[in-house]
Image (cartoon, grey):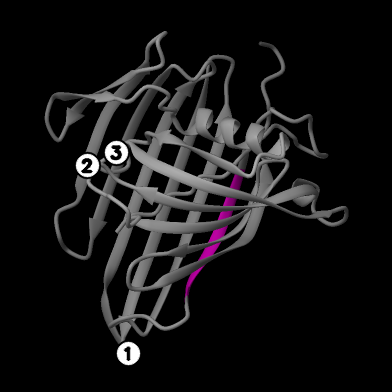
Amino acid sequence: MRFLVLAVIIFGLSAPAAAGEIAPHRALYEVTMVGPAQNIDDAVGLLSVEISRSCEQWTYSQRFELKLIQEGADLGDFSFRLTAWESLDGDRYGFRSTTSQSDEAGVKLVGRGEINSDGAGLAKYTEPAAFERPLPSGVLFPIGWLKAGLAASEAEKKRFSGHVFMGAAPDEPLRVNSIIVAADAVSQGEALLRGPRWRHLSAFYNQTSAEVPEYEAEETVLANGVLAGALMRYPTYALKVKLQRIEALPVPSDC
């Protein structure tokens, strides 16, 4: 299983900010199962996302916990944690992720990534073993990917595609094809939830995928970058991601 949130984000604390900026924030989401599923009666979980900024880099963390249930019995727990940093220019990246399921030994990935002047990149792992993997030309790390997606939305493009590397799974980078659909703007309520928004309909492919995506996502993304909600479609079931709580984080003012 994989869970990946690719939301477009920009700066903004008490009001919508200018396009292209990124808003440090912390958000908590409830995760539930929707529709019929094969061999699963229910699924409940939580997703937390935090994005902060210093004068030198972005820091990104994600934690996802999911419990699967069948006929009242617990089928096991799935857990994913990612902590990463990315340079402000998007050329350097460091990551640490752990994926585990029930009592099985987890998969731990630790390493760094870099993008060269020609647009190609290189991922250097230190765990589970020391090895290197070339990254395709045009690859982006998470914050760079989010900024590019926002730019495409602001430019009223209908489609957006490319490769993104997060260090969340051994088979990255992921190839992503997205359709962008404008949605109604929100003018009232929580400041971080105001402004224009888009629906990003995306298909995610790993290195061995051909025509069939590994999973699909329908995300509602605000112009201030907040992920308002999502529907994640996996081969045998679907999950709804609903925003429960959000708070703005400070932006450094002395850089």
Of helix, strand and loop, which mostly describes the magenta segment? strand
Q: x, y (%) of residue 37? A: 36, 80
Sequence-earlier tag: 1 or 2: 1
Q: Is residue 246 left or right of residue 88?
A: right
The numbered mark at residue 108 is 2
- Residue under circle 3? 172
Percent position (x, y) of residue 210? Answer: 28, 50
Q: Earlier in the sequence, mark 3 or mark 1?
A: 1
Out of 126 and 223, give the one closest to the viewer.
Answer: 223
Of all residues, the one furthest to the bottom in this rendering is 71
| 90 versus 4 height, above or below | above
Q: Residues within 10 Å of mark 3 (few under 14, many from 20)?
A: some
- What is the secondary structure assignment of the residue under circle 3? loop
- Magenta stretch: includes residue 130: no
Mark 3–mark 1 Cα distance, whole angstroms, equals 35 Å
For label 1, the residue is 72
Q: Residue lying farthest left?
A: 129
Q: Residues within 10 Å of mark 1 (few under 14, many from 20)?
A: few
Give neighbour class at mark 2: few <14, some 14-19, many 20+ (Cα, 10 Å): many
The residue that appears at 63% across and 44% down in the rendered structure is 158
Farthest top residue in view:
117
Q: Position of 91 compared to 245: left or right? A: left
The relative height of residue 168 versus residue 185 in the rendered view (above or below) is: above
Could you tell whether 161 is left or right of 197 in the image?
A: left
> What residue range appears in magenta?
26-33
